[in-house]
Amino acid sequence: MKFFPFLLANLLRKKVRLSMTIGSFCVALFLFCLLATIESSFNQGVEVAGADRLVVINKTSIISPLPLAYRERLLQIPGVKQVSHAIWFGGIYQTEKNFFPQLAIDHKTYLQMYTEFRIRPDYWEAFVKDKEACIVGPRTLAKYGWKIGDRVPLRGTIWPGIWEFNIRGTYQGARDEDDLTQFWFRYDFLDERRLPELGKGTVGWYLVKVENIDMAAKVVAAIDQRFANSAFETKTDTEKSFASDFVKQIGNIKLIMLSIGSVVFFTLLLVTGSTMSMSVRERTGELATLKTIGFSDITVLFLVLAEALFVSLMGGGVGVIAGKLYTLTGDPTGGLLPIFYLHPQKMVMGLGLALLIGLLSGILPALFAMRLKIVEALRRV
Amino acid sequence: MAIPIIYNIRSIIIRWASNSVAVLGIAGVVAVFVAMLSMARGFEAALVSSGSPQNAMVRRGGSSSEMESVVTLSQVKVISDALGIAKGYDGNPLVSPEVIVIASLPQRSTNTDALVQIRGISPHTFEIRTTVKIARGRCFTPGLPELIVGQNIPKIYRGFELGAQPHFGGRTWTVVGIMDAGGSAFDSEIWCDGLVLNQTYKRPAFIYQSVTVRLTSPYALAELKNSITSDPRLTVQVERETEYYERQSQMVTTIIKVLGFLVALVMGIGAVFGALNTMYSAISARVREIATMRALGFSEWSIIVSFICESMFIALLGGIIGCIIVFPINGYTTSTINWQTFSNVAFAFRITPGLLAEGIIFALLMGLIGGLSPSIRASRLPVSVALREL
């Protein structure tokens, strides 16, 4: 610690270079945070999916409906603890650009299924009492300036007409990465108002909670077998593999973006490292002087290394903090990526990477400094 | 008086090692920038080229895509009588009521299912969608479970080669033809007889999702719109086909563009740091040269201009190299899910001259920013002190 002022003085000698080295570390780490966030937002759903929940969809595809009558039949299957259902509404608020997910849910069972969503009991009570009620996530509330008690109109796309809802409450996620943009309203309201030929008495998908996770595979097989060869065959999967199958369809786009980004991240850091080693080599004479006045080889090694680590930590720290602050401002595409969240784990990983590169870029010059022969070094000009 | 540009070029060549770091940095940024935008543009182009300005799509009012729409046979008949619709070889109006089903089919690459749009077409479809041709095999026989598939389908999904017999929707089909739709979204679709499709998926026989009509000319849209919207029997919306497909591409394009820009911007800042570093060290190594030039009578301004030119020249080199690196991805085909139509679309990266020009401009901008403050510093060097330096 007593060498700290010396370290600082050394670093501050070339302020421009220092600020640029720190700056590029900072940019690299910001980029890292950004890529990590993009990666997890493409994986949205997979990370937050509940392991004990199954999703039952129509075998044809998720947009084909399933009859409401399946609910009772699902409950009869051994190992099934609870069944709920939902349907995608796809309404438009003012213009098509205002995208947020709207789900018509079964208000009797949905909350027991999604225990990760926290709702104040009075909000839920109001929701259950009012048929035209809706519960809106805090992100969506904030985005459109809605308040609890407001009445909001949505233009139906699948079910034509203007649908008006009373906002009766909002929810919070148990985890930071939970999707806070959803808009829920009551399935019975939808089903009552829609025309018979537009899927009255059907749901989009069923959610099944199993009694214990070990039974999931058995229940999956039992459900699909139960409805095989019926008019509405089903395809059941755990929520996690359902979400990850969906993510796989995004295909190469994710891979391309991330691989490009990672290559750039490393080049940026390597360039920074080379600048740092340059600054050590410039001071060969000084290092020799230090040794002449009695500093041991190891101390010189540590001094040089500490300098590199200090710079990388400073730059990396600022970059990670800036990255976190940026992701807190929300999704840059305006609602298309509902989960835009930088996980603390990734932040730590980023800092670790910065330190690693600092170490790698410092170790060669540091070894060079340690092995420096005083006579030879002082002879150089 | 201006300093000859050859001086800067020679200086760059002499200090090639440190300059090449800056050049490569900028090249990387430009390559990423162009790659991201070409991806967005390719996706957009695949969808937009699906539509023709001379076609119009009629859907139920309020529906934002074909899937959500329902049109009945009696409505189709009313639409056929509307004004502005071209006549086909058989003398009937060119109207194509179509059925859309989304099916999940097994992907080759991941072994998981992906969603594919299956379009049940009508006899007039090929006369309306003139860009779609049968490349191999033949068209399906009406009434039989036969499929014609877009040319990307056999590449992406298992069991859809010519002559294959895929099983979905509870029946076995035969692939009898491969379509070439010129890289548009139809290349990622499967077509069959609309009646057979409705029957397979146990839907009512004469219910369609959309009606596409051929206009007498691209200018006849207003005429058609008037005639359809004034009819009280119809609650439909009319849209030019190109506009429809452009809208369907918006979501994915926006995501790629916004994220691509963001990544390129952050990288750009990094590259500017690299350029600044290079220029500062270039200048501190040439303190005496600069002082000599000042002593010879070159003004502060000509020093600034000269060094900015040098930095922009480095950036230009980087930009050109970046464009060369990225160019091979032009035409590379990949596929992604389009959330708006809920189905997978294959598309090719498209690098256009305009995009390359944007990349070069981006590079020059980085060079300008990276060169500005070092060159100002160079111009401010006190001549007498600098000349004395060793």
Image: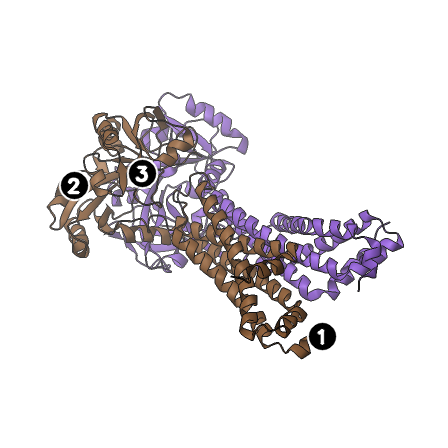
Chain colours: A brown, B purple
Q: Which mark is residue A334?
A: none
Label 1: few (<14), some or many (≥20) within 10 Å?
Answer: few
Q: What element carries label 2?
A: helix
Is B361 located above or below residue B155 in the figure? above
**Which residue bears the numbered disc 2?**
A71
Return the x and y of residue B215 as percentages of the image width and height. 49, 33
The residue shown at (20%, 41%) is A112
Do labels 3 and 2 touch, CB within 8 Å? no
Say if residue A81 shows up in the picture.
Answer: yes
Type of residue at label 1?
Arg
Type of residue at label 2?
Arg
Q: Residue A380 carries which label?
A: 1
Return the x and y of residue B192 as percentages of the image width and height. 35, 47
Structural distance between the alpha carbons of marks 1 and 3: 67 Å
Q: Is mark 3 on a helix, strand or loop?
A: strand
Is A119 located above or below residue A53 in the figure? above
**Which residue bears the numbered disc 3?**
A172
Type of residue at label 3?
Gln
Is B11 located above or below residue B245 in the figure? below
Judged by depth in the image, the label closer to the viewer, 3 or 2, is: 3
Q: What element carries label 1?
A: loop
Closer to the camera in the image, A73 or B385: B385
Q: Is residue A350 left or right of residue A247?
A: right
